[in-house]
Amino acid sequence: MKRVLSLAVSAFALAAVPAAAQDVVITNATVATGDGSEPIQNASVVVRGGRVVAAGAGVEAPAGMPVIDGTGTWVTPGMFAAATTLGLWDVGAVGSSNDQAAGGSAFSAALDVTRALNPSSQHIAINRAGGVTRASIFSRPSSTIFGGQGAIVDLGADPDMVVKPRAFQMVALGEFGARIAGSSRTATYAELDNAFREARNYAAGRWDGDDAQLTSADAKALGAVLSGEQSLYLAVERASDIRNALKLKTQYSRLKLVLVGASEGWLVANEIAAAGVPVIADPIDNLPESFEELAATQSNVGRMVKAGVKVAIGGLTNGIEQPRNAPQFAGNFVALGKIPGAAGLSWGQALATITSAPAEIAGFGGRFGVLAPGAAGDVVIWDGDPLELSSAPVRVFIDGVEQPRDNHQTRLRERYRNLDESKLPKAYDW
């Protein structure tokens, strides 16, 4: 038995060894660098040692490097999912496989998503095949307005997916937060202010557990938010809620705010831009779904970008549950620009909302979401325009390592593609 266990452990250890990065040159492709600029025809991308060395037109292929002829293909950086729960659930309706929220926990701000992440989740494999290479993972606020500490991850096919643990704190304000805190927005701010006060006391060594509402672990965790070490992702929708959220920066000078949702962001776009606060906006907010979204419009993102707001697309509740569909929403913004009176985005701006913008919001500007010298070798080769629905990735690299694109869905497709009904597989032949 020991020998069997030893072999099993060895096999696991072997599988856990990350694959080596591949040096590669992709030539003759249409290259979109993800920085907001327009695609470049007949361009090349050079990846060496897991990083991008060069990208653009006139880039020479270094001698001796393997070459991929990209004729007829498009090359982009890997997509960066701005706010998602990938890896925290398998079947949403099955509680035992769902770690998106911890409503019964005695802890709140101290919750750490890295302990629950499952790199083997089929959602990870499916989205990796769809061109998603990085993501910001959050847990949903439930018993308090604090969701806990989110993480930055990669979607590589290896056991170690965490790039940066405890990268940000998710907090719900607006209607969502009010329902949690006591059925009123007043309660959300009382809870937030009290939590920050207790966090300051904890950091200053004045912690009094008998007089505190937070656990000491929660108070300690929020210290990283007040110091600016962690970003504070605030879920807000209504324009007045956004204004109140922006005022927090005057009370807590080191806060690194990120607005999540912001359905009515376009109404206060100039104020958001002046505050230098980025936004992760729900791309499908078009009609009001609640009183806090009465001014929702699909032009929201275009108008905020025009005002100078850095915008990535994502969502907290009704947004992108499958980030691999993000190119569709980005393509919608391009189409929107052709409708009189609507505010859309250029092709390059639209791609940036799912590549460089979310990476910058996560604190990884220049490293992820772009094809630029020094950036991670996260490269996706597409069989056509990536913002066109009929296009799909044909090769995906993360840190210069080519990734498998097979998953449960592709295996089912192949199993039934040319089914010979005279030889049906056995029910247990998985």
Image (cartoon, grey):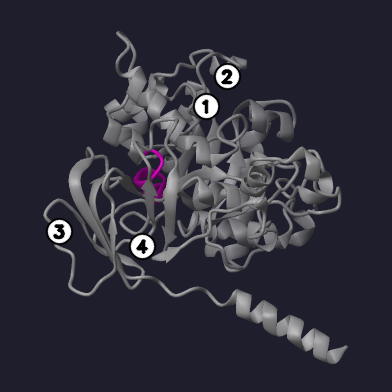
Please tell me whether residue 233 is drawn above or below residue 346 in the rendered image.
below
- Left or right of residue 359: residue 42: left
Nearer-N-terminus badge (3/1) = 3
In percent of width and height, residue 200 lies at: 57, 57
Residue under circle 3? 59
**Tag 2, which secondary structure?**
helix
Residue contact between numbered discs 2 and 1, judged by CB atoms under 8 Å: yes
Q: Amino acid at mark 4?
A: Ala
Distance CA(mark 3)–CA(mark 4): 18 Å
The quadrant in which residue 40 appears is top left
Q: Tell me the crowding category of disc 3: few under 14, some 14 to 19, or many 20 or more residues within 10 angstroms, Cα based.
A: some
Dot 2 or dot 3, earlier in sequence: 3
Image location of residue 105, percent across then percent down: 80, 51
Give the residue displayed 37% in from the left and 32% down from the top: 272
Q: Name the residue carrying label 4.
A: 376
| Pointer 2 or 1: first along the chain | 1
Label 2 or label 1, whichever lies nearer to me, is 2
Separation of marks 2 and 1 at Cα, in angstroms: 9 Å
The region drawn magenta spans: 353-361
The residue indicated by pointer 2 is 292
CB contact under 8 Å: marks 2 and 3: no
Return the x and y of residue 362 as percentages of the image width and height. 44, 51
The single residue placed furthest to the top in the displayed view is 340
C-alpha span from label 1 to label 4: 37 Å
